[in-house]
Structure formats: C-alpha cells, structure tokens
Amino acid sequence: MAEDWWSVASEVGKIDPGYARIGRIQAVPNRPGAEDLAQRRGREAVANWKGKAEWSVTGAGDSWLPQPASGLVVLDSLSARINPARAMLCLAEALRRSGCDILEGTSEGGKTEFTVWATGHEGLQQINRDFAAEIGRGEKGQALMIDYYAGSMPQIYSDGIHVVPHANGTTSVGSTSERYFTSPSTVDAKLDELHSRAIRTIPAIRNAAVIAKWAGVRPRTANRTPLLGRHPRRNGQFIANGGFKTGFGFAPLVGESMAQLILENTSRIPEEFLCDYHLGPRLVKSN
C-alpha cells in the first residue's frame, strides 16, 4: 500500500520522499533453531505475501553483506526505505497544495468539529496521567548519517543495527533503544558505540565520514501496537499514537482508517489497536 501512497504524495507535493522497495538483508543468528525459524518464515511468506514479495535464506558473500558466524542471511524483497525528514516535508507540501492549512508553533487549532491527537510520547504520558496507568512511554533512539553510496543495495539488519541506503547517496545507521534517558534530543557515547558495531558488522562503511547525528523519542505502547480510535473521554476527539518502530510502515493504512472512522463513522481498525483495548478495565467513559 505504501508504494502507491508515497508515489501520489510525491506527485502532489513535488518533493521526493526517497521511498523505494529495495528489500532487506538480515543476518541469521548462530544459535540452535535460528536457521529452521528463518526457513519456516520463508514458507509463511509464500502463503502470506501472495507472490508480491519473496523471502529466501542464502549464504553471505558480498562485501556489503554482514558476515554472521552462521554464514547465512535472509533476503526479503518486501522491505522498503524512506527518508523520514523528506517524507514529512513531502506530506506537508502535498497537504498545502491540496488546500489544507498547517499551523506551526501552536498546540491548539481553531474550533473544529473533529480533533485527532497525534502527539507522540508526550501524548502517551498525558494518557498515563488521565487514567493513572502505564499505557505507554517514550523510548529514545539515536542515529547517524554517513557519506556512503550503496546504490541500489538492500538495507541491512544485523546485530540490532539498521543500515539504510538513501536515494540521495547517503546511508543512515541506527538506532539505539533507550528506555531511560535524561535528554531526549542529545547524542552521546551510546551512538559512538553503535557506530563501532555497525563498522564491525559491515566493514565496507569503515572509512565513510559521519555527516549528521540526531536523537529523538518514539512513542511506545506497553504492548508495542498502535493506539488508535475515539478518545474515551472526549466526544468528537480521536487518538493516533504509538507508532514506535512501525510508524512509517503503518502510516498509510492508519491515515485511511482514521479518516474512515471520523468521516464515515465506520471502523476497520483491529481490536487490539483500539483505545478501549489498551485501556481495558481502567476505561471509564464520560462526556
């Protein structure tokens, strides 16, 4: 769904979000059962992906590939890449060109019939306070960009590290996962250690210069699924939160599902994503 969706956004917004279905390489861990699990997932992919993508287990050989102790990697053709910053610029410009207003520097818009609270980890903290429960939290991630051109090579996931070639000729390396932190936007030695691990995993990037570093906080619900649907205590208000590590992948479907819920009063959102499901017995509805 994302491939067509971002293509339209790019056409309307006149900005390339860097989307491409380049596939992904994953190292098969060197532990009992890991190869059998990878092979089983390949058989499941045949049934679930219905010929739209492939999953194969193969030997590691190319200099770009990680060289795991198992000697095996998984290659899938389903995974895609996107440049997050350019994607957001693309989406914002597409909205403006479609007649929408984007208000910056304010937390409140004008009086509208409907409001969607898509407020990240701060929004999850507010829900925690409202319901005196740990529904979700923020998890910090640090990442960096290097001056390395990988062409059309697949992205890599190995040893907990993502290495993603971008359309502009750079490559991103990320990210840390920090449950406890003091500063949400600063980088530190944890990112340096991650960079060193990435070089050990993929020696081809050893001499690539670091051209950018950044940090941010991702909204993570307790069960790692999105938090979507009607606000349990505010009529005419809705929540879209909990993207965490699947936010860009889910984004087109989340957007369409929320629009359908708001404008048509019908829902195709899975039960386990709904606010009522997350809140469970703590939910006390009031107008």
Image (cartoon, rainbow, N blue to C red):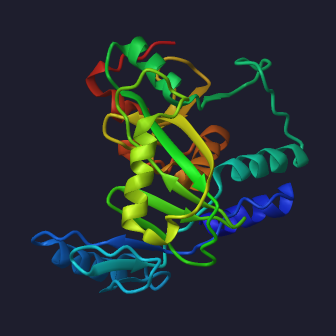
In the rendered structure, the answer to whether residue 207 lies left or right of residue 83 reads left
Residue at 56 percent of width and 75 percent of height: 22
Q: How many marks?
A: 0
Residue at the extreme left of the image, as rendered: 32
Q: Is residue 23 left or right of residue 146?
A: left
Place of residue 116 in the rendered image (x, y in percent of width and height, measured from the top left): 63, 30
Query: Is residue 180 in view from this perspective?
Result: yes
- Please give left or right for residue 47 compared with residue 163 in the image: left
188 to 252, vertically: above or below? above
Res 35 → quadrant: bottom left
Residue in view at x 55 percent, y 67 percent? 80
The residue nearer to you, when weighing 155 against 64, is 64
User: Residue 244, how many percent across, how many down?
Assistant: 45, 42
Instruction: Tell me if I can see residue 274 in this picture.
Output: no
The quarter of the picture where the N terminus appears is bottom right
Q: What is the x, y in percent for residue 6?
A: 70, 62
* Residue 143 on image: x %, y %: 52, 46
In terms of depth relative to the viewer, which is nearer, 242 or 176?
Answer: 176
Q: What residue sits 36% from the left and 71% below the top? A: 26
Determine whether 112 is above or below 221 in the image.
above
Quick one: 106 or 62, which is closer to the camera? Answer: 62
Residue under the image location 67 percent in, 41 percent down: 263
Residue in the foreground of this view, choosing between 157 and 199? 199
